[in-house]
Amino acid sequence: MRRTFLLMAAALCLLTPIANAEAPLTGARAAILLEAETGRVLFEKNADERLAIASTTKIMTALLAIESCAMDEIVTAGKNASGVPGTSIYLSEGEQLTMEEMLYGLMLRSGNDAAVAIAEHVAGSVEAFAERMNARAGSLGANAYFTTPNGLDSGGNGASARGIATIAREAMRHEAFVAIVSTKRRTIPWTDHEYMRVLTNKNKLLRTYDGALGIKTGFTKKAGRCLVFAAERDGMRVVGAALNCPNWFEEAADIMDYGFETYSMVEVLPEGAVLTEGKERFTLLSALRVPVREGETADTEIESNEGGERVWAVVNGERVVCAPLLREKETRKPGFMEVFRTLWMRWSAFNI
């Protein structure tokens, strides 16, 4: 049976006011901005309509590859990978690269052929890989449906802005993913050529936006210009998406500016904090932080159920993020009779 307690110690956290910026006007068909640590929505527009998302699909491809493979695994391009239409790193059949090199080709050059090579390496076929993509999206609660690893318009491949941003937020938990998508330029081998492949990141925000971290561009006639983006400033990381957005880089910058100008991260409780509820004592296993804006306050609630205990940060009555708690074992002082009995037993043993 679940129990919820209002934490009396530090029950109300008054937060540092931040000037509320005016919400951006975006021409995107759909857009969203999330705070990466908690997933709190900082801005959204039509965020739940599933749309074509072009090559931003490759975020899921990269996530599955990183979760499934070592970066030094050798990936061999099969006949299906060679000659895939659209943007390409020009893989030849039988050519071998490490998974890390394939991922740079996937995310910087947006290689459709690299996507197929990765999919076949991970799952054996594009179809089997698409099934894994959909299963992973389901595990994240992301509104998305994948039929290809590269995002070419086929069979209803697409996601909502919230869905692809949720997938990107999960991918950004991996240092290897962050390292790849935040790289501006990289060279990788090119079999049977005298020179290396030179890969340049298509995301202009890496060169123009302070704190930018990537993530992925995409374009088809059906999807329009799509951009999934991320940045970090003053200890707060944001992840967002703008789908079918003509002025993608400019409007992504405006959306992130709004997030950084309106919200900031506040530590509601530090790691190691000791919380009490009646006779029960709990230790916080990780810091509890939450993004807030001017006028907002954060309450804390302890939730206890069969799975253990955790404490929630609650902003404007909504649970935003939780952190695990460790219940301390009861340490009760022995009563008079218990002390007397112990001493008597020791005295008796001594005088036998």
Image (cartoon, helix red, strand yellow):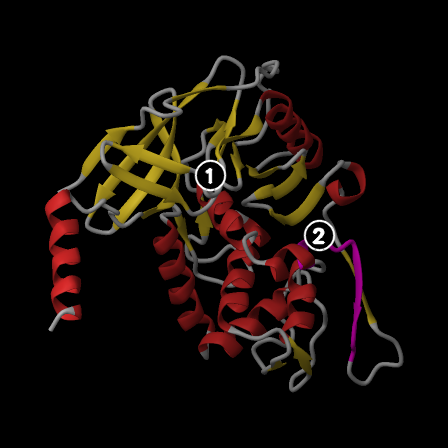
Instruction: Judge depth for marks 1 and 2 and give the one in front.
Output: 1
What percent of the width, then of the height, locates residue 237? 60, 39
The segment highlighted magenta reads 180-190
* Residue where numbered disc 2 is placed: 182
Above or below 19: residue 288: below
Q: How far apart are marks 1 and 2 (CA)?
A: 21 Å
Q: Name the foreground residue: 277 vs 94.
A: 277
Q: SS of the residue at dot 1?
A: loop
Above or below 136: residue 217: above
Q: SS of the residue at dot 2?
A: loop
Q: Is residue 68 left or right of residue 332?
A: right
The three-letter amino acid code for the residue at tag 1 is: Gly
| Residue 76 seen by the camera | no
The crowd level at tag 1 (other Cα within 10 Å; few <14, some 14-19, many 20+) is some
- Residue 186 is inside the magenta segment: yes
Q: Report the residue at 78% width, 53% height from top.
A: 184
* Residue where numbered disc 1 is placed: 39
Q: Is residue 101 left or right of residue 281?
A: right
Above or below 22: residue 118: below
